[in-house]
Image (tube, rainbow, N blue to C red):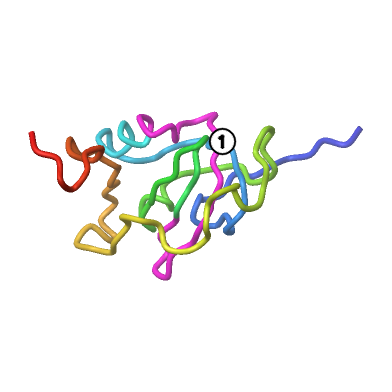
C-alpha cells in the first residue's frame, strides 16, 4: 500500500465549510491559553463556517462558534479534510449571515481573541426590577 503524506497548512487557508484537525497553535501564552479554553487545541477538530472580508474567520468547535482574526488564523496549523463526526453544511436552526455580536473594531489584525461573555441581566425581561 502506498504511503500518503498529509501536509499541514494555516487555518486561514481552509475554505468556508471546510473542516480540519488542529496540529499546532504558535501564539504567545495568553492568546494560546484563551483558544484552548474555547476548545481550539492541538488534536481538536475545527470547521470554518464563515470567512470575513479582511481574512478573519468564524470557526465552529463542537457546538460553539467564535471569530478568529487573520493574524491569529495564520498562526494555527491544521491538517485539512473531513473530520470524523463533523457534518459539513448548514446547522439546523442557524441562519447564514453575519454573526451576532461580532463587530469589526480596534482589535482587528492585532492577534487578539475576543470571546463571549454572559451578562448578568440577560435572562430578565425589560420590565423586571431587582
Question: Closest to the observer: 11 or 37?
Answer: 37
Residue 114, image x, y percentages = 28, 47
Residue 83, image x, y percentages = 66, 37
Please state, as top left, top right, bottom left or bottom right, where the N terminus lies in the image. Answer: top right
Which residue ends up furthest to the right in the rendered image?
1
Which residue is identified by label 1? 45
- Residue 64 lies left or right of residue 4; in this view the side is left
Residue 53 in the image: above or below residue 114: below
Residue 111, image x, y percentages = 29, 51
Q: Residue, x 29% and y 39% (percent of image)?
A: 31
Toward which corner of the image does residue 128 lie, by quadrant? Answer: top left
Toward which corner of the image does residue 29 lie, by quadrant? Answer: top left
- Whether residue 27 appears in magenta in the rendering, the answer is no
- Whether residue 46 appears in magenta in the rendering, the answer is yes
Please tell me how crowded label 1 is: few (under 14), some (14-19), or many (20+) other residues with Cα within 10 Å.
many
- Residue 86 lies left or right of residue 129; in this view the side is right
Q: Residue, x 51% and y 51% (percent of image)?
A: 10
Which residue ends up furthest to the front in the rendered image?
127
Residue 7, image x, y percentages = 64, 44
Q: Residue, x 49% and y 31% (percent of image)?
A: 42
Toward which corner of the image does residue 124 lie, by quadrant? Answer: top left
Residue 31 in the image: above or below residue 105: above
Q: Magenta stretch? A: 36-57
Please state, as top left, top right, bottom left or bottom right, where the C terminus lies in the image. Answer: top left
- Residue 56 lies left or right of residue 10; in this view the side is left
SS at badge 1 = strand
Amino acid at each position: 500500500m502506498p504511503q500518503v503524506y498529509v501536509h499541514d497548512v494555516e487555518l486561514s487557508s481552509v475554505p468556508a465549510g471546510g473542516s480540519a484537525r488542529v496540529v499546532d497553535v504558535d501564539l504567545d501564552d495568553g492568546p494560546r491559553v484563551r483558544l484552548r479554553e474555547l476548545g481550539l487545541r492541538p488534536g481538536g477538530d475545527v470547521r470554518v463556517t464563515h470567512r470575513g472580508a479582511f481574512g478573519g474567520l468564524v470557526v465552529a468547535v463542537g457546538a460553539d462558534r467564535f471569530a478568529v482574526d487573520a493574524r491569529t488564523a495564520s498562526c494555527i496549523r491544521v491538517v485539512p479534510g473531513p473530520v470524523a463526526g463533523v457534518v459539513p453544511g448548514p446547522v439546523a436552526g442557524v441562519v447564514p449571515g453575519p454573526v451576532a455580536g461580532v463587530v469589526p473594531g480596534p482589535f482587528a489584525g492585532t492577534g487578539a481573541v475576543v470571546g463571549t461573555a454572559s451578562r448578568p441581566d440577560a435572562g430578565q425581561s425589560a420590565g423586571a426590577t431587582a
